[in-house]
Image (cartoon, grey):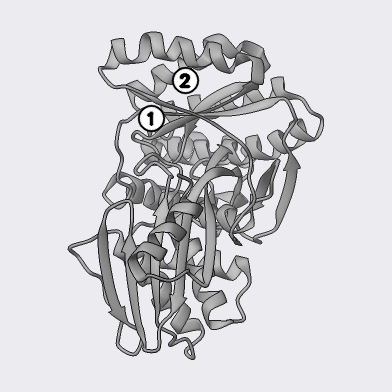
Amino acid sequence: MHPKSQSRHLFQQKYNKAPTLNVYAPGRVNIIGEHTDYNDGFVMPCAINYGTAISGAKRDDQVFNVYAADLNECDQFRLDQPIVPNPAKKWTGYVRGVVKFIQERCPEFRQGADLVISGNVPLSSGLSSSASLEVAVGKFCQLLGELPLSNTDIALIGQKAENRFVGANCGNMDQLISALGQAEHLLMIDCRSLETLPTPMPKDIAVMIVNSHVKHDLVTGEYNTRRQQCEAAAKFFGVKALRDVSIEQFQKRETELTALDAEMAKRARHVVTENQRVLDAAQALNRGDISRLGELMNASHVSMRDDFEITTPEIDYLVELAQSVIGKSGGARMTGGGFGGCIVALAPAEKVDAVRQIIADNYQQRTGLKEDFYVCTASKGVHQC
């Protein structure tokens, strides 16, 4: 059952009445531009046809009563008391954090509600189940309280919740694409100015996502370390963020930076070159040049593997398998924060079955893990439904 139908159905079952407010926010896959968002750079994701639905209704008190259908768990907190984390249940942080920061922005928001949340974004896969949940909660609150918040505001509140309440130092891409996605388009986002440029997805091109089932958890360690290394590299170049360093500027001082800290130099090289790849990818898409887009995606994967060092042997193998079938008609790369999760591949629709087949024939045999294979469509951002 689709999350939109499931959340409605469960609300009706649980409360014996129909919900009065239904919202839906999609997950996302990032086509190119990895770990550039928190460096004030460029990204190019699309919202996908997997997401989070919330069905709910007002209460006559100031209690938020939340049921997470996928986990069969409940959470309850009051809007007239300080909102603090519930350490026993990690998922509640994404809900409580958003409500807390909405109240910070709109102190008048005190309207209690019963909510049922249902989602079908695979958890810990790198497809942004957390951002989808945050944006859905934000939109629900905005409509519930008739608050003067734009979808961009909702996205940034979601990011703040994840940074300051949950403790994952993510950039703003995931929430922005969940809030602002457009059907049949990729969205190039300038993560500094928040300007967006919808870029049409060619009609006959399929977006394939393959979940490696190597689990990752971004709150711990490696992700935050990468972020610190990038900030240190920006300081070395005397700029606000690595977005401000061109490839030429990087190359001029690369030897000096490598002598100082070889690892930091590699991290910076990834971000600087990845920003350029996103800009080049937008041009390639506008020309309908999928072969060039594929080259850029493949180069992005090599950079994540060798310079940013966030791939795993399983992920590298999935990319290799996909690329062997796709050839010059598209591309494949790891997508998401890294250390597991998913790959994304773009190719003509007629290649989908062959890509699926080669992975089914080889991946489990080599790794002992069974992949999940999704064919996605570029979808609309958060909306009332």
Residue 186 picture quarter: top right
Q: Is 352 located above or below residue 339 in the figure?
A: above
Q: Is 72 located above or below residue 99 in the figure?
A: above
**Dot placed on the residue nearer the N-terminal end, 2 or 1:** 1
Residue 118 shown left or right of residue 300 in the figure:
left
Image disc number at residue 181: none
In the rendered image, which residue does mark 1 sit on? 311
Residue 63, x across and y down, in percent: 33, 82
Which residue is at 51% across, 52% downward?
Answer: 174
At label 2, which amino acid type do we have?
Answer: Val
Q: Nearer the viewer, mark 2 or mark 1?
A: 2
Outermost front residue: 16
Residue 385 picture quarter: bottom right
At label 1, which amino acid type do we have?
Answer: Thr
Outermost left residue: 88
**Depth check: 103 or 117 in front?**
117
Residue 43, x across and y down, in percent: 60, 45
Image disc number at residue 319: 2
**Depth check: 101 or 54 in front?**
54
Residue 84, x across and y down, in percent: 27, 76
Which residue is at 72% across, 38% downward?
Answer: 282
Q: Is residue 166 visible?
A: no
Asked whether disc 2 touches disc 1, contact meaning CB atoms under 8 Å apart, the reply is yes
Q: Is residue 210 visible?
A: yes
Residue 113 picture quarter: bottom left
How far, Cα to Cα, is label 2 from label 1?
10 Å
Which residue is at 40% across, 60% downward?
Answer: 117
Label 2: how many Cα within 10 Å (few below 14, some 14–19, many 20+): many
